[in-house]
Structure formats: C-alpha cells, structure tokens
Image: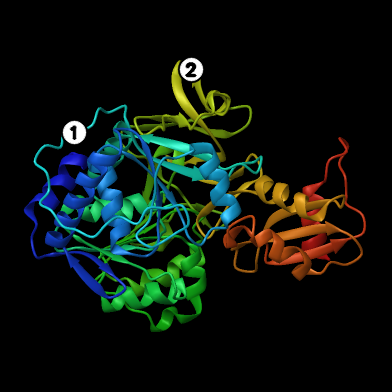
Amino acid sequence: MSVYSGLYNSLLQASNHSAIICRGESYSYEWLSKRVGFLSNWMLENTQVQQPIVLYCPDHPDTYALLIACLLTQRIPVPLHPGHPIDRNQRILNQINPDWIVSPIPFTNSITPPEGFQPLSPDFSVPPENNIAYLLFTSGSTGQPKGVMISWKALQAFFEAVSQEEIKVDAKDRVLQMFDLTFDLSFFSTLLPLISGATLVTVPEDEIKAFAIARLLEEENITVALLVPSILNLLYRFMEDLHFPDLRESLFCGEALNVKPTLAWKNCIPNATLRNVYGPTEATIFCSTYTLPENPEYWEHQLGIISIGKPMPGTNFTLNPETGELMIGGNQLFSGYWKDAAKTNDKLIYYNDKLVYRSGDRAVLQNSHWLFTGRLDHQVKIQGYRIELGEIEFQLGEIIGNRLGAVLAIPDTVGNLELHAFIEGEETHPERWRNPLAEKVPAYMVPHHWHGISEFPLNVNGKIDRQALQNLKIHG
C-alpha cells in the first residue's frame, strides 16, 4: 500500500471510527478528514510545494492534523518541540530560516491556524519519490543540530518493508504513540495507524511517561506499541503486577535492549510478538528487526544485549573490516543533511560500488543475526534519543569557561546509560552548571551526575582519556 494513498483513503472515508485519542478525548476520522481538509486548503493558499513548514508540536490533536496536511500538500514538515530549550530551537530555525512557524497554541512569531472544517480535496496527487517527505533535526557533534532529509521514496520503502515483516495493523487496532514528533520513531507510531484506519493513542506529556504508558496499555486496550527500552527499566519493579493481554505487537527501538527486563516484560504480554528493531534516523525510522523466539533460551544476545536481527527487505548491511563500522545501504537511505554537503558526503559514501550510510555503530554478525557492540564515536542513546556527547560538551564549555570538562554515558547497575559530567576543580556544585545548561539543551541531554576532578587523565595525544575517567567513576 502506498503511504500517501493509504493516508488519503483513510481520511476520504471520513468514518465515525476513532482516529486519534488525545488526553482521553476521541477524534473521529470524520473530524480529522474535515480538519485536514481545511488546513490543507489553507496551506495551498499560503505556502508552496516543498516549502519547509516548522510545526511547533504540543500534545494536541491539531498537531497531527497539521502534520498530515503538510504531507498531503507536499510541504516539508519540520517538527520543533515546546519542551526543548529556546536556544536549541532557535539554532534549528536559523538553519531553515522559515517563512512559516505553525502551532496549535499561541507561540511567539508563530501562526495559529484558524478554526474551520472543509471536505478533503479530491485533487491531491502522489508526490514524486525524490521529494522530501519530512525533515528532522538530530544532535550534532559541533553543537549545531543537523537536519536529516527523508524522501517519499525512503518513507515508502520503510512501510513496504514493515508490511513484509508481517507487522500488520488494521482498523481494529489501537496503536500507542509515546514520542514527540521531533523523534523519528513517532512517524511509525503516527502514520502506521492512520494509513490503516486504526486508532492512534497519544501519551500525555504532563504525566510520568512510564506510568502513563502502563495506564494506557490497559485502559485503552492497546494492541501495538513501539517503546524505548528505558521504559522497561522504569517499570521493572512493578512488572509482577502488570498484565496486558490485548497487546499483540510489542516493539523496542532507540537503545540497547537488555535481556533481564525483557524477560520480565515477556510475562506481562502473553499474546504479543516481541521484536527488537534498529536503525538510525538516516535509514528512515528503523531498518532491521529481530523477532524474539518464544523460548528465551534461544534469544540471540551478547553480554546481555539482545540482537538487532537482520536487515529489513530492501536494506543491506556491510561491515568495514578495518573499523568494525556498520554501513547501511538500500532503499531507506536519507537524501542528505539540510544545506550541509560536506557532512552529507562524509556520511553517504560509495563502498564496494554501493551507496551506503556510515552509521558510526560497531556491530558483529553472529549466527546470521547482527549484534550491536557500541559506537565508534561519542554518540549514545539516552531514553531513546540519539545524542552527540560533543554537543553537550560544546554547550557546557560555553558555560564553564576556562575549566576543562567532559561528558560520558556510563551504565548504571541495571545497564541503563546515564550522563555524567566531569568538571575541572576539587569539587563541583551541580546547580551552578545544570540550570544554565538546561537553557541550551533538552532535558534528556542534561547530565544526572556531576563530578569535580582536580586533574583530568590524558592520553598520549594529550586528549582527555575517557576510559580512565570512566574507570575513576566506576572504581572511585
């Protein structure tokens, strides 16, 4: 099924079936169709094809209506999140220099779309495959977020591969959407139900996310849920009391999936297929899957980290024998970084005569399944968000001045990565640095642990010896 046609046909039917459940309120496909119809006409009158439209995305039904209107009119949605620091959002805006910032709620320099409902236009046409479907900004190592351009070709290839992996959704399903729209996994949780006539259920932003997810899985009879593994760690102590018999597809992505909490989770979801999926934003949402066997004795894992499985149809993996870097090829590759040819040419290369993306991930092939073994650089995933430690260090350096500083991601006692900041000095006062940093980066990029260190260990090249720093933390 075409993503574009599936989305359009679901709306064209304009049924009374629930399309979106947001903060406990249900919005039918009829409501969504007429709201998207109005917003689409508004965009056609005021904007141009392939024009970036910044969407300021609160937890609101119009957020989804605006996103769909952008897609149907072939505008390029660029999500920003209200909870992210103004400074970081401004750095993204500076790169795009948009004519339009649209928000369901009033926001400085933004346009709040007028109220109105109209029938959906019958004149939409399927976009050229090389047109950009959406633009997402991810963490950048220089302190500057980088824009990842995803084409309609890549998006279509992703959903075709999902279908071939037999991840099926129909009108009876209720799909959890736990992510804000700046996170690429949200496009799976949003578009999959809406192109299938199913119901999308959002997680309120003002609740503790793990507990809100557990509540919604039960109260809303969720049947399909893509989660980040951090949720399992947060729910682990309560799992003996959790039971979700309606869940039939339980997927995890965004971080390493650990065996121990996954075993406990398996007992909570007796009727679900359990999958670990993997993929960077540049490979369109996710590009490999591993379906965990019913018997945990047969789970593929290394050092307690569950396999990322095999490439999805249309994707291929290649390993650089010198560095162990996983290189990703195939139909789901992104189109490049927004206005950054140098970065694009560094990451999109030809290897053995095939175009591949240098993922920066290390991997090994074991029993025909791929295993993630770490990063080549300092990029990590915290709470499912891809983070360049260099971006945090860059912003921290602006705050601490002449002091030396470093940020590491160190596993806690259950293997969950936590951010640790090390600052030159006999002692450190977290409140002195934490609040200014929180004005520069999102909350998930602010370290939880702060350490004063009188003298930084250096390697032979005069650089900070990060392994020695980590050992100081672990053994100190």
Q: Quadrant of residue 461?
A: top right
Secondary structure found at label 2: loop
Residue 22, x across and y down, in percent: 29, 69
54 to 115, vertically: above or below: above
Secondary structure found at label 1: loop
Say whether residue 307 is visible.
yes
- Given the image, on which type of amino acid does mark 1 rest? Val
221 to 184, vertically: above or below: below
| Residue at 60%, 68% in the rendered image | 414
Residue 232, x across and y down, in percent: 47, 68
Say whether residue 367 is visible.
no
Q: Quadrant of residue 449?
A: bottom right
Label total for image = 2
Residue 26 lies left or right of residue 218; in this view the side is left
- Check residue 56 in the rendering and tell me which mark sits there, or answer none: none
Assess disc 1: are there few (<14), some (14-19) or many (≥20) residues with their C-alpha within 10 Å of its C-alpha. Answer: some
| Residue at 46%, 52% in the rendered image | 109
Q: Which residue is mark 2?
A: 352
- Given the image, on which type of amino acid does mark 2 rest? Asn
Q: Which residue is mark 1?
A: 126
Q: Quarter of the image containing the C terminus? A: bottom right
Q: Nearer the viewer, residue 437 or 363?
A: 437
Mark 2–mark 1 distance (CA, rounded to whole Å) = 34 Å
Q: Quarter of the image containing the N terminus? A: top left
Outermost residue to the bottom: 241
Assess disc 2: are there few (<14), some (14-19) or many (≥20) residues with their C-alpha within 10 Å of its C-alpha. Answer: few
